[in-house]
Amino acid sequence: MGEGFVQSLGHPGGNFTGLSFQGVELLGKRLELLKELVPGGAPVAVLWERGSLVAWQAVATAARERGWKLLSLEIRDAGEIEGAFKAATGARAGTLLVLTGVPFVSHAPQLAELAVKGRLPVMYPFRQFVEVGGLIAYSADLLDIWRRAAVFVDKILKGAKPADLPVEQPTKFELAINLKAAKALGLTIPPSLLLRADQVIQ
């Protein structure tokens, strides 16, 4: 809604409706999980690109409300990813938060490798990052969202107007943790986090 695609969640208007990933709404929770994972006053580096400007603004607001320091690492293309990691470690960031963006999805294995190289615990936007070597991710359950999307398609094919179909909010969320990545980082995952994890990769 913050990007102007719908008038409201209950009454989208126009030709848009569907399911929200709550990508922006979950950013505060991701920050809190990072601070639970690595407590302390070190800044949280945030890797983002211009397409995720709204998300960056939301992260900045969430951090300011909690009194936490951020380090902005905006990139223009994937070629700047490695330099961003070097900037994070050079600034003694305690952790790094990756926002949603095409360069990050297509270079997920590289992100995981750079995290280990820089000894930097990284929070990702989706479980798929953790499955290719990333440390931790928290998001809406994407498989559940895709299943629900089929219901929307069925309703529209039967004549329903998108403007009349409320945008649905996710009801299932997933926390994924990669213990192999944690070991490579020399990091012990707090038991409180492990107990809440929906997926633990050994």
Image: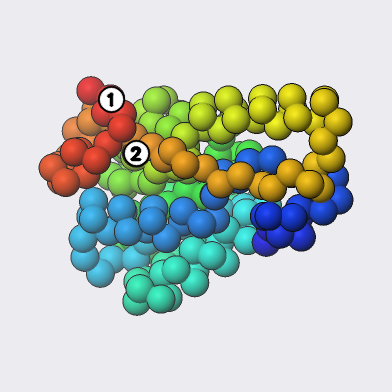
Looking at the picture, how far across and down is residue 181, in whole percent?
A: 27, 32
Residue 175, labelled with which disc? 2
**Mark 2 residue crowding within 10 angstroms, few (<14) / some (14–19) / many (20+):** many
Q: Nearer the viewer, residue 180 or 201?
A: 201
Residue drawn at point x = 41 percent, y = 25 percent: 132
**Mark 1 residue crowding within 10 angstroms, few (<14) / some (14–19) / many (20+):** few
Mark 1: amino acid? Ile
Q: Nearer the viewer, residue 123 or 175?
A: 175
Q: Quadrant of residue 174?
A: top left
Instruction: Answer whether residue 198 is visible to the viewer in this image.
Output: yes
Mark 2: amino acid? Leu
Looking at the picture, how far across and down is residue 24, in whole percent?
A: 54, 55
Q: Which residue is mark 1?
A: 201
| Rendered position, 196 above or below 180 | below
Q: Nearer the viewer, residue 11 or 67?
A: 11
Q: Secondary structure at mark 2?
A: strand
Residue drawn at point x = 57 percent, y = 67 percent: 57
Looking at the picture, how far across and down is residue 69, in whole percent?
A: 37, 71
Q: Quadrant of residue 202?
A: top left
- Tell me the distance, in whole angstroms, between the alpha carbons under discs 1 and 2: 11 Å
- Tell me if 87 is positioned left or right of 15 in this view: left
Q: Nearer the viewer, residue 78 or 130?
A: 130
- Tell me if 93 is positioned left or right of 191 in this view: right
Instruction: Answer whether residue 113 is visible to the viewer in this image.
Output: no
Q: Quadrant of residue 187?
A: top left
Q: Secondary structure at mark 1?
A: strand
Residue drawn at point x = 47 percent, y = 48 percent: 98
Looking at the picture, how far across and down is residue 158, in whole percent?
A: 82, 26
Residue 144, labelled with which disc? none
Q: Earlier in the sequence, mark 1 or mark 2?
A: 2
